[in-house]
Image: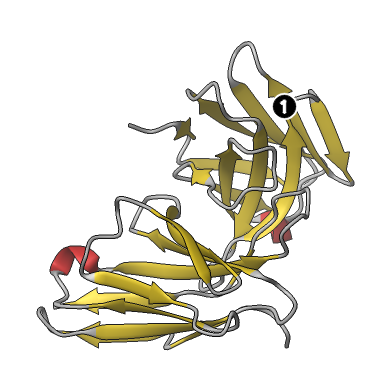
């Protein structure tokens, strides 16, 4: 049973445009959400996070939006750059972010074309 | 480089053999985690330590798997009597307890292939 779902295995965008990556979850106990980025042959690296008490968090070109009622979050990257090409994982935890036990989605491969 | 390091990066073994992976976390981090990632999936939680204490184990961690962190520093993950279904990337991560972001720092992983 997939508690965190990334329904788009891949996404392709042009450099300079917006990339929108989506994530849905089913577990109402999740209260903290994170996005990780993974390049080939490297481990995942943390990108941005959001607590369930917020609906938006922004860090430079990256913004995460949370819609609790819809159990949906999205990551916006604007403007997209070729170096953003990677697999993006959505993850969730149920212990307020101080947690260890993250549940990951399957990932979305983002390709940013020059 | 003071990131999380894992060894070996690749291991090919025959079914039934034992394998051991080592993880060296970021030095000041007191939490250490093991995750497993199979092809086309996201990482799945296996177990975690706070200092030397193993505080939780996933049901994915069968009795053929054992993890230790004897002095609260490096950790080992041993798989006994390997099966083809154990083929995966084994990821280690570390963090500092009390940090609010929940950010884990991952190593590059140890890829296991069981023939």
Percent x, y for residue A108? 52, 44
For the residue carrying disc 1, how many other residues have a C-alpha within 10 Å: few (<14), some (14-19), or many (20+)? some
Number of marks in the rendered image: 1
Question: Which secondary structure, mark 1?
Answer: loop
Percent x, y for residue B40? 36, 51
Figure coloring: secondary structure
Q: Quadrant of residue B97?
A: bottom right
Left or right: where A20 falls relative to B83: right
Tell which of A39 and B26 is nearer to you: B26
Residue ranking furthest to the left? B16
For the point 58% across and 19% down, the residue is A71
Chain under disc 1: A
Identify the image quadrant of the N terminus of chain B: bottom right
Left or right: where A18 falls relative to A110: right
Tell which of A85 and B66 is nearer to you: B66
Establish if B39 lies above or below A61. below
Q: Is residue A7 visible?
A: no
Establish if A96 lies above or below A88. above
Q: Is residue A104 visible?
A: yes
For the point 66% across and 17% down, the residue is A68
Left or right: where B66 falls relative to A71: left
For the point 37% across and 76% down, the residue is B111
Identify the image quadrant of the C terminus of chain B: bottom left
Percent x, y for residue A84? 70, 55
Q: Quadrant of residue A64?
A: top right
Establish if B43 lies above or below B23. above
For the point 10% across and 78% down, the residue is B15
Left or right: where B36 falls relative to A74: left
Percent x, y for residue B61? 30, 59
| Residue named by callout 1 | A52
Residue ranking furthest to the top? A69
């Amino acid at each position: 049973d997939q508690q965190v779902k990334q329904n788009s295995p891949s996404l392709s965008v042009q450099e300079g445009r917006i990339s929108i990556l989506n994530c849905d979850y089913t577990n109402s106990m999740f209260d903290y959400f994170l996005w990780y980025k993974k390049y080939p042959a490297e481990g995942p690296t943390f990108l941005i996070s959001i607590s369930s008490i917020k609906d938006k968090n922004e860090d430079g070109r990256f913004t995460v939006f949370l819609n609790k009622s819809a159990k949906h979050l999205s990551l916006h990257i604007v403007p997209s750059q070729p170096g953003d090409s990677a697999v993006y994982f959505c993850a969730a935890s149920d212990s307020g972010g101080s947690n260890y036990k993250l549940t990951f989605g399957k990932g979305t491969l983002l390709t940013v074309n020059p | 480089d003071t990131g999380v390091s894992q060894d070996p990066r690749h291991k090919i073994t025959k079914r039934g053999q034992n394998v051991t992976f080592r993880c060296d976390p970021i030095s000041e981090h007191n939490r250490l985690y093991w995750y497993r990632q199979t092809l086309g999936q996201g990482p799945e939680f296996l177990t975690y330590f706070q200092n030397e204490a193993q505080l939780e184990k996933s049901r994915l961690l069968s009795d053929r798997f054992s993890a230790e962190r004897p002095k609260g520093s490096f950790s080992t993950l041993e798989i006994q009597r390997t099966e083809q279904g154990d083929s995966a990337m084994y990821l280690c991560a570390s963090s500092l307890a009390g940090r609010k972001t929940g950010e884990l720092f991952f190593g590059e992983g140890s890829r296991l292939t069981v023939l």
